[in-house]
Amino acid sequence: MAIAKGSFLLIVTLAAGAACFAQQKFPLRPGEWEVTTTFAGASKPFTVRLCLNDQLWTKALAPNKNCTIQNMSMNSRGVNYLEDCPGQTPPAKGRVALSYEGKEHMTGKAFFDTTKDGVITTTTMVVDYRWKGPECNAEDVNLRQSKPAPSPPASQPPGQPH
């Protein structure tokens, strides 16, 4: 079962966005970032480009009707938090950990449990963020106006990580 469109981008954006929850400023170098996500059991990673800067951090941190962030702990090396997304289909709940590795690299790991038809599935994903340059591109997935966000490959394991 493929992960629903938007769920993938939500984890990519919010995982990074939560890091700035208290400071409202993007803690790393602003610009275009390449984000590679690998799901446990998947044959191929999924890569997108995002524009990340103070304005887009603020937008990512806007209240979300589907998910809440709790128990956030952050320091100069990264952030950890729990996320509960009862408004998603299927609902998901999990733990996210991000590590800053300089101003141009960040890594993350997320573990999410989803419940569908009474069955709980745990999904693990590893996310690698790499700064590509100071200029964003209109084709960056979070800047596209008329095109839908891409879906991860259909070979993903069951469940929705976020």
Image (cartoon, rainbow, N blue to C red):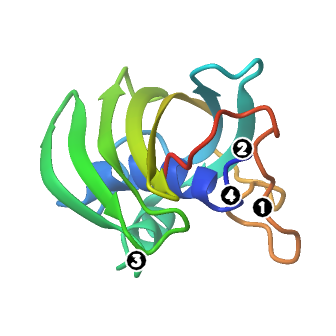
Q: Which residue is mark 2?
A: 49
Three-letter code for the amino acid on which mark 2 is drawn:
Arg
The Cα–Cα distance between marks 4 and 2, rounded to whole angstroms, is 19 Å
Q: Residue at x 33, y 33 (%)?
A: 98
Observer-side mark, 2 or 3, equals: 3
Residue 109's spot in the image, x, y percent? Answer: 40, 29
Residue under label 3? 64
Please, what secondary structure does the residue beneath circle 3 have?
A: loop
Query: Separation of disc 2 and disc 1 at Cα?
Result: 11 Å
Q: Amino acid at mark 3?
A: Asn
Q: Is residue 135 left or right of residue 14?
A: right
User: Which structural element holds mark 1?
Assistant: loop
Look at 44% across and 54% down and name the residue there. Answer: 115
Which quadrant of the view contains residue 156? Answer: top right
Does any portion of residue 51 appear in the rendered image? yes
Q: Can the viewer see residue 23 in this picture? A: no
Residues marked 4 and 3 touching at CB (< 8 Å): no
Measure the alpha-carbon separation of dots 3 and 1: 18 Å
Relative to the observer, which residue lies in front, 130 or 40?
40
Could you classify mark 1 by the number of other residues whose Cα lies within 10 Å: few (under 14), some (14-19), or many (20 or more)?
some
Q: Residue at x 32, y 26 (%)?
A: 99
Q: Which residue is mark 4?
A: 4
Q: Please report whichever mark, 4 or 3, sits nearer to the chain's N-terminal start.
A: 4
Q: Earlier in the sequence, mark 4 or mark 1?
A: 4
- Residue 113 x, y percent position in the rendering: 39, 44
Q: Earlier in the sequence, mark 3 or mark 1?
A: 3
Tell me the number on the disc at residue 149: 1
- Which residue is at the front of the view, 48 or 71? 71
Measured from the top left, where is residue 43 in percent x and y? 76, 17
Q: Amino acid at mark 1?
A: Ala
- Callout 2: SS: strand
